[in-house]
Image (cartoon, helix red, strand yellow):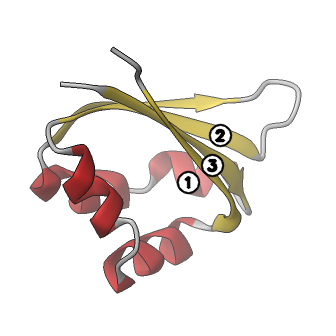
Amino acid sequence: MPTIIGHHDVEDTDHWLASPRREEFFGPLGVTNIRTFVDPQNPSHVAVLMDVADVDALMSAMESEGAAAAMDHDGVLPETLALLVEHP
């Protein structure tokens, strides 16, 4: 199961950290062990580290209206999103 890092900027770090939307969106995709990170030098720059059972399913889901709604709810600035996939 590969690990993926997603990093991006957010409008409100405290809101993003407290939001249940990550689990709601990623859970049904088989994503587990979701951990959150905040850049101490730039608190609006954040990251998630997660274990992903099906990378293709995740990448497809990230293009969906559900992903856009979750990002909007969490204050994610989508133009800053980058995903890094663990290389075996």
Q: Residue 14: which numbered mark, if any? A: 3
Circle 3 sits in a helix, a strand or a loop, which is it?
helix
Q: Earlier in the sequence, mark 3 or mark 2?
A: 3
Name the residue at 50% across, 69% down.
71
Placement of 81 over or under 84, stated as above or below:
below
Q: Earlier in the sequence, mark 2 or mark 1?
A: 1
Residue at the limit of the structure toward the bottom, as seen here = 65
Name the residue at 30% across, 66% down.
60
Q: Is residue 56 left or right of residue 65?
A: left
Mark 2 is surrounded, within 10 Å at the Cα level, by few (under 14), some (14 to 19) or many (20 or more) other residues, namely many
Q: Nearer the viewer, residue 58 or 73?
A: 58
Which of the image's four quarters has the C terminus?
A: top left
Which of the image's four quarters has the N terminus?
A: top left
Mark 1 is surrounded, within 10 Å at the Cα level, by few (under 14), some (14 to 19) or many (20 or more) other residues, namely many
Circle 1 sits in a helix, a strand or a loop, which is it?
helix
Q: Is residue 33 left or right of residue 4?
A: left
The image position of residue 19, as x and y in percent, is: 43, 56
Residue identifier under label 1: 16
The image position of residue 81, as x and y in percent, is: 63, 55
Q: How far apart are marks 3 and 2 (CA)?
A: 11 Å
Q: Which of 15 and 65 is in front in this view?
A: 65
Determine contact: label 3, label 2, CB under 8 Å. no
Determine contact: label 2, label 1, CB under 8 Å. yes
The image position of residue 83, as x and y in percent, is: 53, 44
Placement of 80 over or under 35, stated as above or below:
below
Give the image quarter of residue 41: top right
Number of the front mark, 3 or 1:
1
